[in-house]
Amino acid sequence: MDQAMAEADQAARAGDIPVGAVVLGPDGFEIARGRNTREALGDPTGHAEVNALRAAAKMLGRWHLEDCTLVVTLEPCAMCAGAIVLARVGKVVFGAWDEKAGSAGSLRDILRDTRLNHNPQVQGGLAEAECAHQLRTYFEAKRGK
C-alpha cells in the first residue's frame, strides 16, 4: 500500500485526486503502477486502477490478470470495478472506502456480483486511515480549509 500511496502523492502534485494503484504479479512483486491522470491528460478514464491495469497487461503481454493482485488507495468506482472484472484480476486490496461512488461494497458491489463472469477476492480497509487522510488533506487544501 505504501507504493500505491506514493503514486497517489504524485497524482496530487500533478493536480489530480490522490489515488494510486499497484499491480502485484503472482510472485507478489510489483509489475505495474498507476495513478489518477484525469486532469493531467484530460481523460475521463484516467483512473489509477485503469492506468495500472493497462501497464500490467502491457508488461505481461496479456490482458488476463487472474494471477495478479491490484492494490489501490481508494475503493474502486463502477468503471474501475468493471475493468477489474473484465481483466479477471485475482484479488483487489483497497484502502479507504468511498461511500459516494464505491463499487466494492459501499454504494454497490460489482466485484462480488455473482451474476458476472468473474469475481476477484476483495479486501477493503487496508491502511484505511492513512489513505482517507491523504484524500481528506487534498480536498481540504483544494477547498481552502
Image (spheres, rainbow, N blue to C red):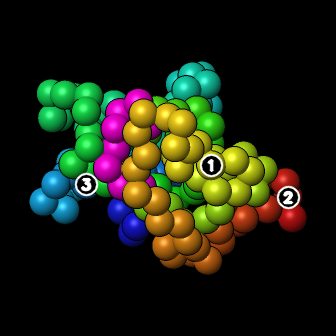
Q: Nearer the viewer, mark 3 or mark 2?
A: 3
Q: Amino acid at mark 2?
A: Gly
Assess whether mark 3 and mark 1 are in contact (beta carbons under 8 angstroms).
no
What percent of the width, then of the height, locates residue 66? 26, 43
In the rendering, at what x and y percent does residue 58 appear?
22, 28
Magenta stretch in the rendered image? 85-92
Q: Quadrant of the N terminus?
A: bottom left
Left or right: 15 as drawn, with respect to 123: right
Task: Report the disc number at residue 109.
Answer: 1
**Sequence-first disc among 1 and 3:** 3
Q: Which residue is mark 2?
A: 144
Amino acid, disc 1: Asp
Type of residue at label 3? Leu
Residues packed near mark 2 inside 10 Å, few (<14), some (14 to 19) or many (20 plus): few
Q: Position of residue 56 (x, y in %)?
A: 26, 38
Write the residue at 61% across / 65% down: 96
Point out the tag, 1 or 2, that comes first from the N-terminus. 1
Is 80 covered by the magenta stretch? no
Q: Which residue is denoted by mark 3 in the rendering?
A: 24
Give the residue drawn at x 34%, y 38%.
88
Mark 3 or 2, nearer chain start: 3
The Cα–Cα distance between marks 3 and 2, rounded to whole angstroms, is 36 Å
The answer to which quarter of the image holds residue 92 is bottom left
Tag 1 near tag 2, CB within 8 Å: no
Which circle, 1 or 3, is nearer the viewer? 1
